[in-house]
Image (cartoon, grey):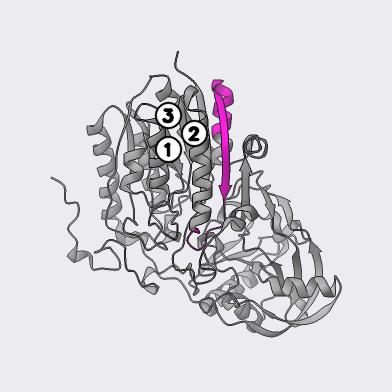
């Protein structure tokens, strides 16, 4: 009987190389979000809608011996500090080595778009280090975010590589289950996985990767149809992450089959061809902040009283894509246009949090809000009169169908509910931690019922729609400035592959180029 001891280690970061401040993401950023070691991995992530939560379920069902090493993840941001990258990587390698004598397989829930400050690819070298220890016969399964930039080294060193099929990422646990099932079947000798991937030369604007409707929904259904075929173990479509300026940035279509490389190639090419043929459908122009706020205001004024809020997405400030989360263009437009019964979450501003803590609940004061991280996200809103409505410890558990996963614990530190604007018509949640408001519980934990607002804005692409769309009357997306801006033409690239549509004219690109 095969040895069924499985080692699990998760090390995840989505790196935006255009972030100006801070210049690196360090261990403190991981500790602020998620850092578990050993048995604490299972204790904290069992039953959660995460990749690790899903694979734990499978380990229990299949009665395999799961040995957790660590689970570490940070909010997307600047390149990972070398010391921090090596700290977690070394812990993973040491943990694998400790279990080498009775090891059946390794599963690594990663991200796919990690960039350490000294490398272009964070995951490929890590998988390679694990491979060097376990040798060619111990299978390694890797699960990734849909926004991964899949490199040749990642494909070469892993036996199986699978990613989310949903954006917002509502299938994290499902992805963990798939990666674990393929691994266990491989350990038991029931399958012999082989992989092939294609790379159509295109960028998909992040909001156009939405999988609940539109072209991406149809392509993911195409992937699922292929996955149901005999001999196909896993099909993934990675939309890539174009906020990382690296040589292997881009779209990819890895396919895993049971010892059938020709079938893997056929399926990967079919998906790549479809993506390329529909390339224009993945590019779009979005309204500027003032226009977007005016549109949201008009929609709210025309909606029924019980229709739910108009929900806005603020692209450039999106912390889920490395944005500073202190962008001011949308809240400034809300104030200037007098949007009533409106909310904004989360504004990152440690200075304002400290001022409010000193003043206390029930105090009125004048602050300078936002725009302090760098010069990319709008000017600070100066001389803003605010009222401190509530202060919490920032701790809450996700309760919705959210991008971050049901049951995941959050700790924002001291968090403030401010009201501001004429007649205090704008509610703002301010935190000293740069974090996304993907789960609507962030409002409720501080005393705001989001369903009762007329307009609310989340610094995000569309990941917030997992939990917010069911309670909304309409959605407005805004092209705002920042490190997470939607249009790749805003950025200066030095390393990405070229030519690349839409940065380059598709008339100059020959694709597909296989025979």
Whether residue 448 is in magenta: the answer is no
Q: Is residue 80 magenta?
A: yes
Camera-nearest label, 1 or 3: 1
On the image, numbered disc 2 is attached to which residue? 96
Asked if 252 appears above or below 460 in the picture, the reply is above
- Label 1 crowd (10 A; few <14 / some 14-19 / many >=20): many
Q: Nearer the viewer, mark 2 or mark 3?
A: 2
Which residue carries the number 3 mark?
Answer: 182
Q: With respect to residue 294, does 214 lie above or below?
A: above
Give left or right: position of 99 versus 470: left
User: Spatial distance from mark 2 to mark 3, Cα to Cα?
Assistant: 19 Å
Q: Could you say where residue 106 lies in the image, as x and y percent from the top left?
A: 46, 32
Which is nearer the N-term, disc 1 or disc 3?
A: 1
* SS at circle 3: helix
Q: Secondary structure at mark 1?
A: helix
Marks 2 and 1, Cα distance to the nearest angstrom?
7 Å
Q: Which residues are magenta?
A: 55-81
Residue appearing at x 52%, y 51% in the figure: 168
């Amino acid at each position: 009987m095969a040895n069924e001891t499985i080692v699990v280690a998760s090390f995840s970061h989505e790196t935006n190389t255009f972030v100006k401040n801070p210049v690196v993401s360090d261990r403190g950023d991981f500790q602020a979000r998620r850092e578990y070691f050993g048995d604490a991995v299972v204790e904290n992530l069992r039953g959660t809608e995460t990749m690790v939560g899903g694979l734990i379920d499978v380990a229990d069902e299949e009665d395999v011996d799961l040995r957790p090493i660590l689970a570490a993840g940070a909010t997307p941001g600047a390149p990972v500090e070398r010391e921090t990258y090596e700290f977690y990587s070394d812990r993973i390698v040491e943990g694998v080595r400790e279990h080498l004598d009775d090891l059946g397989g390794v599963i690594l829930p990663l991200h796919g778009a990690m960039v350490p400050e000294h490398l272009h690819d964070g995951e490929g070298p890590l998988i390679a280090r694990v491979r060097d220890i376990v040798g060619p016969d111990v299978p390694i399964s890797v699960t990734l975010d849909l926004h991964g930039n899949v490199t040749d080294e990642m494909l070469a060193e892993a036996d199986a590589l699978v990613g989310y099929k949903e954006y917002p990422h509502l299938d994290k646990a499902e992805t963990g289950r798939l990666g674990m099932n393929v691994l266990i079947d491989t350990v038991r000798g029931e399958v012999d996985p082989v992989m092939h991937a294609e790379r159509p030369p295109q960028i998909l604007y992040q909001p156009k990767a939405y999988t609940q409707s539109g072209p991406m929904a149809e392509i993911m259904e195409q992937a699922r149809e292929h996955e149901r075929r005999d001999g196909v173990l896993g099909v993934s479509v990675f939309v890539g992450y174009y906020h990382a300026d690296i040589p292997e940035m881009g779209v990819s279509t890895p396919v895993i089959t049971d010892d059938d490389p020709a079938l893997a190639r056929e399926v990967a090419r079919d998906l790549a061809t479809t993506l390329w043929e529909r390339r224009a459908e993945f590019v779009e122009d979005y309204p500027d902040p003032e226009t977007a706020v005016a549109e949201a205001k008009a929609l709210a004024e025309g909606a029924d009283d019980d229709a739910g809020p108009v929900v806005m997405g603020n692209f450039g400030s999106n912390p889920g894509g490395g944005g500073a989360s202190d962008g001011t263009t949308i809240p400034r437009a809300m104030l200037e246009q007098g949007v009533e019964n409106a909310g904004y979450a989360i504004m990152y501003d440690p200075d304002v949090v400290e001022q409010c803590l000193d003043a206390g609940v029930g105090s009125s004061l004048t602050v300078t809000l936002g725009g302090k991280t760098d010069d990319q996200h709008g000017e600070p809103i100066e001389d803003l009169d605010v009222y401190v409505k509530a202060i919490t410890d920032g701790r809450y558990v996700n309760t919705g169908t959210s991008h971050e996963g049901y049951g995941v614990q959050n700790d924002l530190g001291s968090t403030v509910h401010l009201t501001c604007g004429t007649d205090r018509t704008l509610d703002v949640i301010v935190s000293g931690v740069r974090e996304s408001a993907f789960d609507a519980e962030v409002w409720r934990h501080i005393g705001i019922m989001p369903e009762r607002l007329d307009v609310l804005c989340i610094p995000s692409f569309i990941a917030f729609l997992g939990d917010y769309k069911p309670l909304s009357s309409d959605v407005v997306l805004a092209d705002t400035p920042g490190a997470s801006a939607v249009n790749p033409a805003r950025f200066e690239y030095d390393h990405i592959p070229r030519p690349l549509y839409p940065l380059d004219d598709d008339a100059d690109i020959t694709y597909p180029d296989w025979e």
